[in-house]
Amino acid sequence: MKNDQIPQEFQPENNKNAYNRRDFIKNTAVLGAAACVPSILVQACTEEKKTNSDKINDVMPVITSQRSLGSGKYEMEIAALGFGFMGMNYHRGIHPDKNTLIKLAHQAVERGITLFDTAETYGPFINEELAGEALAPFKNKISISTKFGFNYEGNKVTGVNSRPERIREMVEASLKRLKIDVIELLYQHRLDPDVPIEEVAGTIKDLIAEGKVKRFGLCEIGAGTIRRAHSVQPVTAVQSEYHLMWREPEKEIFPVCKELGIGFVPYSPLNRGFLTGSINEYTRFDSGNDNRTILPRFTPEAIRANLRIVEELNKFGKERGITASQTALGWLLQKAPWIVPIPGTTKLSHLEENLRTADFLFTQKEWNELETAVASIPIAGDRYPASEQKQVEK
């Protein structure tokens, strides 16, 4: 399947494409300043209070650019980059201890991120619990989005469920886990074919009236369903996978979002770490906590074939003093002003790398050349196995 037909974290020692992750901290300050025009979107700030152990003359990025998801009464103003919480302790392999993750979440807030995304099914439940504990001190500074839509037996998902009573049950449980009084943005995680979307939207409308939810979102959904839901309760954002290796939303979802004033939130904007250049065919996802083991694009054969795309990102970045990750995120940010990617990480260096993406400006011609180069490369492997793809509405 070719890209032109459809409009995070292991670092093995033998990874030949890991320039961007391993050399980022050493090189980006000098190269970025020399090669690119800085934007007002990111400003440097020096932490005023330092302990004896970190009295280093370091300068950290702070994102100040704001974007809006949705429009009218249900508009949501947030920082131009959000933070995907899922990979902190779910589906992305070995992770640091809880205290380290909480500290990283605090650092994300301190550096200007205001949207943090989670879901009850991440774990299930453990990711919401982590987000709740980590973000509790910042209730009035940040927004948390979460999702509903499944049944469980213990820790196993047993099917989709968006019946009104299940939505209400989930909302009450999520509020407690997240330690908040209201959910800023509540998504239906996957379509339930047994419950009309109008009934789902009506339930969210009632929850908004009751003060338990502020805004409504949809994930991996078709254009027609978006219209039907929006007619009952205005949709603030649609969340879907979107990056240089998966551009399907451009066909039908983007036009609807633009027409109706709906924001778009790309999840896995770095294709589950692949577009960082830190993964190669020898990378193993065998920790027992990594869903890339079942994804067709993460077999050794597919990885080997798809590394041509990473090479294009590295080429673009090295000529301009930025990394492959920054190239991939920068491409997303320039596609539309109502797009807010939510990259996740467990490392401070990667968080800073992502935030510095807004520090660079390039011409539309440059982005178009990158897009054309990547689109000419055939992509090996489907993004989901058949069992998960059937949950995504076309």
Image (tube, rainbow, N blue to C red):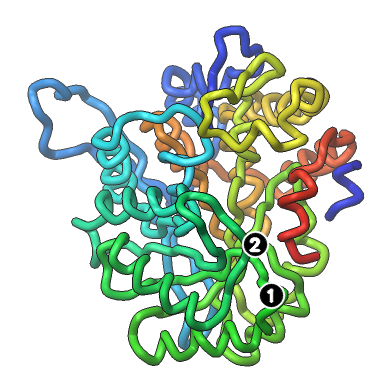
Q: Amino acid at mark 2?
A: Ala
Report the residue at 26% width, 27% height from top: 58
Relative side of 141 to 218, left or right: left
Circle 2: element type: loop
Report the residue at 44% width, 62% height from top: 66
Mark sitting on residue 94:
none
Q: Which residue is mark 2?
A: 336
Picture quadrant where residue 181 is located:
bottom left
Residue 376, image x, y percentages: 89, 37
Circle 1: element type: helix
Q: CA distance from mark 2 to mark 1?
A: 9 Å
Q: Which residue is mark 1?
A: 258
Location of the C terminus by quadrant is: bottom right
Assess disc 1: are there few (<14), some (14-19) or many (≥20) residues with their C-alpha within 10 Å of its C-alpha.
some
Q: Earlier in the sequence, mark 2 or mark 1?
A: 1
Circles 2 and 1: CB distance less than 8 Å?
yes
* Residue most extreme to the front: 153
Relative side of 59 to 92, left or right: left
